[in-house]
Amino acid sequence: MYIQCTKKLLEAGKFELGEYQGSELSPFYEWHANLFVLHRRKGVLLMNNATRYGIVLYGLKATEFKRFDQIVLDSMWETFLAEGFSEEQVRKYIENCGEVRYSKTNSRSVLGHLSQFDWYMSAFIDDYLPSDSINLVGLNLACGGNYTIFKQAGKIVHPLDLLKEEMEKL
């Protein structure tokens, strides 16, 4: 799995950067990520390249960036189960992700959607704070950009619908 990070996130996370070579499986296993700061706390927005499904992580500290790989995978597990996917589907997805690798962002289209996701999320995040969890599952389910629409291959689509289509293939 690739996590394609913005410059701000690369600086904050001090991740070992590799050269992007494309996922062996599909863009479904690639995510763009951006750092944001709100109320003096760091957060990360993750967006799937294929589906534009978004996940919000909030309240990350320096020690958590050291185990960011596991935090991301755990957050995907928790969020996908909350969306109603079976444990088997989520387990297969996580297994197919393989090793987490970091690279620079490479898609202006996904970055544009990530920017919209940031704007959309910022309107609702205060309703889900304070939180003991880094993964704001309630926010991910309630808005998270997953009910916004966009145009793909000439038709209007929803990120959650695309995620369901991809998960059914597993």
Image (cartoon, rainbow, N blue to C red):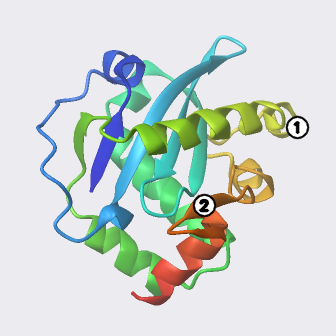
Q: Secondary structure at mark 2?
A: strand
Label drawn at residue 168? none
Q: Is residue 85 above or below residue 158?
A: below
Q: Is residue 67 visible?
A: no
Name the mark nearer the viewer: 2 or 1. 2
The part of the image, by quadrant, that contains residue 141 is bottom right
Q: Which residue lies under the disc numbered 2?
A: 151
Q: Amino acid at mark 1?
A: Asp
Residue 102 x, y percent position in the rendering = 24, 39
Please name the residue shown 57% across and 79% down the image: 164
> How far apart, in angstroms, are the residues tagged by discs 2 and 1?
29 Å
- The C terminus - image quarter: bottom left
Q: Which residue lies under the disc numbered 1?
A: 127
Considering depth in this image, is 158 or 134 the residue closer to the camera? Answer: 158
Mark closest to the chain's N terminus, 2 or 1: 1
Q: Is residue 48 above or below residue 83?
A: above
Residue 37 x, y percent position in the rendering = 61, 17
Please name the residue shown 27% across and 73% down the image: 96
Crowd class of label 2 (few under 14; some 14 to 19; many from 20; radius 10 Å): few
Please name the residue shown 50% across and 59% down the image: 76
